[in-house]
Amino acid sequence: MADRFRITLCQLNPTVGDIAGNAALARDAWEQGRAANADMVALPEMFITGYNAQDLVMKPVFHNAAIAAVEQLAIDCADGPALAIGCPWVEDDKLYNAYMICRGGKIASKVLKHHLPNETVFDEVRIFDAGPLGGPYSVGNTRIGSPICEDSWHEDVAETLAETGAEFLLVPNGSPYYRGKQDTRMNLMVARVVETGLPLIYLNMVGGQDDQVFDGASFALNPGGALALQMPAMETAITHIDLERGADGWRIMDGDKVKQPDEWEQDYHVMVLSLRDYMRKTGFKKVLLGMSGGIDSAIVATIAADALGPENVRCVMLPSEYTSSDSLEDAKACATALGCTYDFVPIKEGRDAITNTLAPLFEGYEDDLTEENIQSRLRGLLLMAMSNKFGSMLLTTGNKSEVAVGYATIYGDMAGGYNPIKDLYKTRVFETCRWRNENHRDWMMAPAGAVIPERIITKPPSAELRDDQKDSDSLPDYPVLDALLEMLVDNNASVADCVAVGFDRDVVKKVEHLIYISEYKRFQSAPGARLTKGAFWLDRRYPIANRWRDNE
């Protein structure tokens, strides 16, 4: 029996639907494993299709193409280490989330996922059938158990594998980020190690897919829970890991232990990686955005410059008579500090034309929100025209606080193809700006330093759609609003819960009302990077026509 076993762990970034491209990544990784004399090359869950492919994977022509690609990989990778790769599988007219072990020119073993996640962003019960509890597979004389992602969150799969002879556990994952996720993963995997007494290798994919980011951060644990390996977060990496067998069974030899970033850096990196991959995977290369001189557009411009390079970001100031001189100066200063293109496009002529066109219809009516929204929608029109003309994706800039209570104009400042800060509350926008001004990393493509002027961070937020307007005229102060939103949206709290911790009932009811009546706006809003388990889209799904109100 072999006393050493080498696995090449491939923390890579697949693209949903690019079966040929994902197969090429797998083949290259296998070549690296063969050059390193690995016994096995391991890739994450559903790697050949990309993840999360949602209903696409149910399409027969798609999942059959994925299976054929893995069968071809098995042939191509016959002379060398075993190749383990996630792939859909059809058996007895049932579709499974499977993990294929390719050896000797064929698919030698298959693991079928047993526990199908059906919460937050996952609908696997809708897509796949549940596989049976199974035993380990063999690579040479070594027996390996592979609970697939969710299977490792439940004790029965790992315990069954240990009882049926698995000598260590290799867990392939498509596990997306939310704030604090790595601590949750680590605690659960330590529990599996303690329960089974087996070493465990947790392999996660990396990269953005629509609103989700798979953050990598793969790791390995020895019996007792000691950390043997920690791979980087948010970065692709290929690592060769060795196990040695002694009198007490297999142990993972110590490898690199990359320090994990704090939550502020992780959130920011997720927003950058999410936008970068969304652009790359949809074929766009450049972006533009409305640069108002406010904090939201400043952080979005910074994220875009860090993700794509300043040369690929166009910042457009569209002033009206309500735009302050501070905003004019601040918008240009931020775009200049970042190194982005800056355009100045006043909206007065267009607004006058629209006002004159509507004057006969609006005669006798007082000016109200309608006139404010015309400004916003005119800006949206002009920005979309530039998007069409220049072939650049328009980014929208509404933070989670605004998205939650509808403090944004549909078909106006909500226009755009992607929103990097959609899941970032306003209070965290302020802190994120401060963090970025004080920190720079090699994955950031914009300049280091205080790229967001201090006045943008410290001045009172305003939409500047009328004289002397402040956000606080319409909404509770953001610290209060965000605390309420975290309770009502993220934690599903009741009105009574909010009142019990000291919030004014009338304020709570107002915020609750705004959340419910804004559902139709969110339904039509651009996708954005998911940072929490309470993100708007797949995490939180509410009806648009809804008369429910909490009357406690």
Image: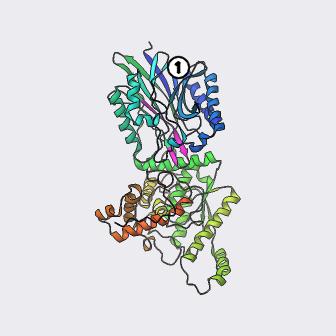
| Figure check: 258 above or below 165 | below
| Figure check: 130 above or below 419 | above
As drawn, is 205 to the left or to the right of 254? right
As drawn, is 416 to the left or to the right of 142? right
Q: Quadrant of the C terminus?
A: bottom left
Task: Report the front residue among 25 and 69.
Answer: 69
Residue type at numbered disc 1: Asn
From the top left corner, tell me how far across and down residue 104 is, in percent: 59, 18
Helix, strand or loop for disc 1 = loop
Residue corresponding to mark 1: 37
Res 476 visible: no
Res 443 visible: yes
From the top left corner, tell me how far across and down residue 370 is, in percent: 57, 76
Task: Report the front residue among 307 and 178.
Answer: 178
Please identify the residue farthest to the front as the structure is shown: 92
**Residue 474 sits in quarter:** bottom left
Magenta segment, which residues?
Answer: 201-213
Q: Is residue 247 magenta?
A: no
From the top left corner, tell me how far across and down residue 6 is, in percent: 47, 22
| Figure check: 170 above or below 518 | above
As drawn, is 247 to the left or to the right of 203? left
